[in-house]
Amino acid sequence: MNRTIKTAWGTLAVSLVVLALKLAAYWMTGSIALYSDALETIVNVAAAVGALIALWVSAQPADANHPYGHQKAEYLSAIIEGGLVLATAILIFQEAWIGWQHPKAPDTPLLGLALNGSAGVINLFWALLLIRNGKQWKSPALVAGGRHILTDVWTTIAVLIAFALIPVTGWLRLDPAIGGLVAVNILWAGYGVVREAVAGLMDEVSDPELISRLDRTIAGNASGALEAHDVRARVAGNTTFVEFHLVVPTGITVGRAHEICDHIEHALRTQLGQAVINIHIEPEEKAKHGDVIIPDRHAHVKNREELIYPQQDFRSA
């Protein structure tokens, strides 16, 4: 079991504990704001199960039907989670509208406050951990789960404010109003999750600086080549796919060209982690005199003939 799947199991366990606390708070108070908070946590539990399945699928090796692997299953999980968020927001809006029409004061607000506050602290810790690890391990499912759980934290803060203000102001409609604001926040968070998942499925470059970093890495590790062009990259889950054309001197040996490619691939994998790299070798007449120019392209050789034919001594010819 890899670390992302272990973390997903942890998310499910945390979500169940938080759900128990929030359901208890809602049962004791009858608050619509607490109802919205508990309802969102039910979605968190469902999303945790979906993330577990997606992470298990994405960890499967490439096969005949999926030669590029199964990493995009994580993006599907994030889209499903976005759909669940939308359904949650609709249910909360419905309950908030009913509460607005028939306002009532929550029961035992202090106990509900304590239970909900405890759940919020647990959620905050776990959400920050998920987002940090998800970005570090390049797992869209973990990042999406962390951001969704983080909306629970904002919900809890809103509920705490509502509970503090209702006795002071005597405005009973504050409870359903807070529930409605929670639904709006959930919708916004869900949009962000779906937007990033769709970008991943469409092979959108999530990091604008990625190509620039690749260019610098190629330029600094392609001694013996002349230039690289048409550098492209896409990210699927924790895997980065890179492809580009590498221009080498005409007549260079296949073995030497292979050594240059190996050196570049090693440098790229050191920077990117898990990566699939395709390099197309081209002769120097295909150079575009742009993109990535290799600054030390003639390093470690005494003349051009030695670069192309390293096993021969032209000086004694």
Image (cartoon, helix red, strand yellow):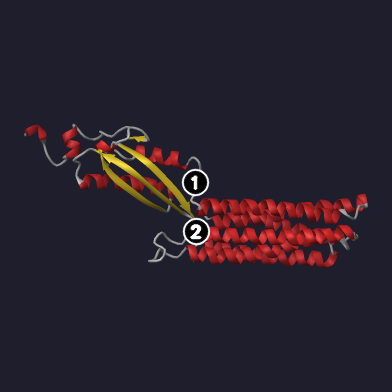
Indicate whether 83 appears above or below 282: below
Q: Is residue 298 left or right of residue 44?
A: left
Question: Which one is nearer the viewer's eye here, 247 or 13?
Answer: 247
The residue drawn where x is 76% and y is 66% is: 23
User: Where's residue 273, x and y in %?
Assistant: 43, 51
Point out which mark residue 72 bears. 2
State yes or no: discs 2 and 1 in contact (Cβ < 8 Å): no
Question: Which one is nearer the viewer's eye here, 299 or 31?
Answer: 31
Q: Is residue 103 left or right of residue 142?
A: right
Task: Return the residue at label 1.
Answer: 205
Secondary structure beneath disc 2?
loop
The residue drawn where x is 48% and y is 62% is: 58
Q: Amino acid at mark 2?
A: Lys
| Total tally of numbered discs in the picture | 2
Residue 69 shows in the view: yes
User: Where's residue 101, x and y in %?
Assistant: 89, 59
The residue drawn where x is 47% and y is 59% is: 71
User: Where's residue 44, x and y in %?
Assistant: 66, 62
Q: Amino acid at mark 1?
A: Val
| Dot placed on the residue nearer the N-terminal end, 2 or 1 | 2
